[in-house]
Amino acid sequence: EAARMQRLVDAAQATQRARDALEHERERHMSERQSRLEADRAWRQQMDETSAHLSQQRERERLRQLAEAHRRDAERKAAMAHKVQSRRAERDAAMREEGRRRKEEARRQQDEHAREREAGGAPQRAQPPQARVSACVP
């Protein structure tokens, strides 16, 4: 009877050790699973942050390129406006010079006509241009 009781105690102890070993293995498995889940969560968060950072970089680059395009466009427009203004100024200067030259020529002709009238000669204006040219050529 004592031997049978000892075998039952031994069997109960072996069963308890097996249960303890299974519980320990289950806890180890759950701990590893929890660690993997936390590592996956941390990795996903890092990927999300990296993705957001890259999106921000892309947006900043897009805005930088847009600003650069606007700047180049403004420079091009300013250059065109400067060119137009410069041409207009050249044209105005040429027109003023032409006006001055015409006034000078008119004044010179008036003086010439006045001298001819004082000298009693016929005004040259009455002569056609060919006659004036031939009168100058010997």
Image: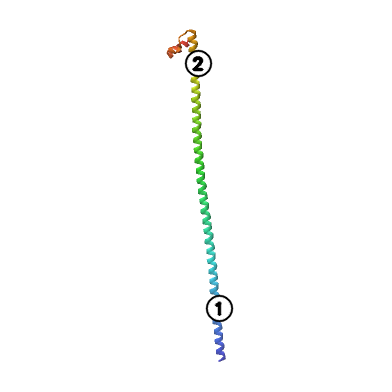
The residue under the point 53% across, 62% down is 43
Q: Secondary structure at mark 1?
A: helix
Mark-to-mark CA distance, 2 and 1: 129 Å
Residue type, mark 2 in image: Arg
Residue type, mark 1 in image: Asp
* Tag 2 residue: 108
Q: Secondary structure at mark 2?
A: helix
In the rendered image, the quadrant that contains the N terminus is bottom right
Crowdedness near tag 1: few (<14), some (14–19) or many (≥20) residues, C-alpha within 10 Å? few
Q: Report x, y in % for residue 107.
A: 50, 17
* For residue 43, above or below residue 76: below
Query: Observer-nearest residue: 138 or 14?
Result: 138
* For residue 80, above or below residue 101: below
The residue under the point 48% across, 10% down is 117
Query: Observer-nearest residue: 67 or 117?
Result: 117
Query: Observer-nearest residue: 7 or 30?
Result: 30
* For residue 76, above or below residue 48: above
Q: Report x, y in % for residue 101.
A: 50, 20
* For residue 7, above or below residue 76: below
Q: Report x, y in % for residue 66.
A: 50, 46
The residue under the point 50% across, 28% down is 90
- In the image, 53: left or right of 130? right
Q: Which mark is residue 54?
A: none
Sequence-wise first label, 2 or 1: 1
The residue under the point 55% across, 77% down is 21
- Disc 2 versus disc 1: nearer the observer: 2
* Tag 1 residue: 20
Query: Is the residue under label 1 in contact with that under label 2 (CB below 8 Å)?
Result: no
Crowdedness near tag 2: few (<14), some (14–19) or many (≥20) residues, C-alpha within 10 Å? few
Q: Report x, y in % for residue 113.
A: 48, 12
